[in-house]
Image (cartoon, helix red, strand yellow):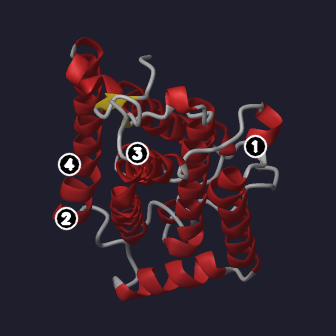
Amino acid sequence: MKQPSSNRNKMQGGGLRLRRFIPTSTSSGDLLFSPFARAHLWWPLLGMSLIIAIWGAAGADFWLADHIYAWQGGSWSLKKAFLTEDVIHVAGRNLSAMAWLGLLISYAIARYRDGWSHYRRPLAYLLLATVTGSLLVAWIKSWSNVDCPWDLIRYGGERPYIDLFSLRPIGLSRGRCFPSGHASGGYAWLALYFFLLATRPSWRWWGLAAGLGLGLTFGISQQLRGAHFLSHDLWTATICWVASAALSLGLWPARKDVVPAPVTSPDLGRTRPLGRAI
């Protein structure tokens, strides 16, 4: 039985509204420079790079850390505080790890339940994106050789300040404070933006707010403890966002058979998932 044109157009419009959030190219070259990639990868990367460059050129890390240090009475009195160390640092890290394990369980369920089949690819993406962002930060931190503020002579420590691109004096032990590892446990959840973009597009800004909120909470707490400069957190946020955006391009190459959310089929008049199982 032929459907009325108004209903058919309405259902087709719903599918088009969903697919407008997904990249529309399939070749790697077109995908990397598609409007989606420019808006979600290249422009944010350029913007954050400019902010980091201007912040560094102005010496603003020291300006901010000096004020925080002076506010605490010329010491890092919040380094061992219950809120900053026990709640935000330790419990926050554990909470982020538990959330990732919850995702893993959800993905395992989606693999074996047909009713969750349209969430398989988005959940797989979210698992991969969150762990990739954190691992990239940890990897860079392992060789970047930058000290924490609390280690510096300027703030009561024993080491001179050696920036990221300077040679470290022989005999000076390694620094392991750049980028901010703890903040990555929050900023990794910026991937929620892309997860919700594919599953519930109208909620994507809530996903972005959640990732930013967690990252800022973890990052500011560590700055108050003397563990990081603000630039360390800016780098971490940039790394996590770029990782999330790049993986979203790789996992959703905008063919309608891989759009990972259910839409109404115009020819059958019922809801069906368009995402392929992983």
Q: Position of residue 28 (x, y in %)?
A: 77, 32
The circle on residue 32 is: 1
Distance CA(mark 1)–CA(mark 2):
43 Å
Q: Is residue 220 left or right of residue 56?
A: left
Pointer 1 or 2: first along the chain: 1
The N terminus sits in image quarter: top left
Q: Residue furthest top?
A: 112
Q: Which residue is mark 2?
A: 83
Q: Position of residue 164 (x, y in %)?
A: 73, 55
Asked whether the residues under the numbered discs 1 and 4 touch, taking CB atoms below 8 Å apart as contact, a structural biologist would say: no
Q: Amino acid at mark 1?
A: Leu
Residue 207 in sight from this viewpoint: no
Distance CA(mark 1)–CA(mark 4):
38 Å
Quarter of image, res 231? bottom right
Distance CA(mark 4)–CA(mark 3):
51 Å
| Front-most of residues 105 and 184 | 105
Pointer 4 or 3: first along the chain: 3
Q: Residues within 10 Å of mark 3 (few under 14, many from 20)?
A: some
Q: Which residue is mark 3?
A: 8
Q: Which residue is mark 4?
A: 91
| Front-most of residues 161 and 123 | 123
Pointer 2 or 4: first along the chain: 2
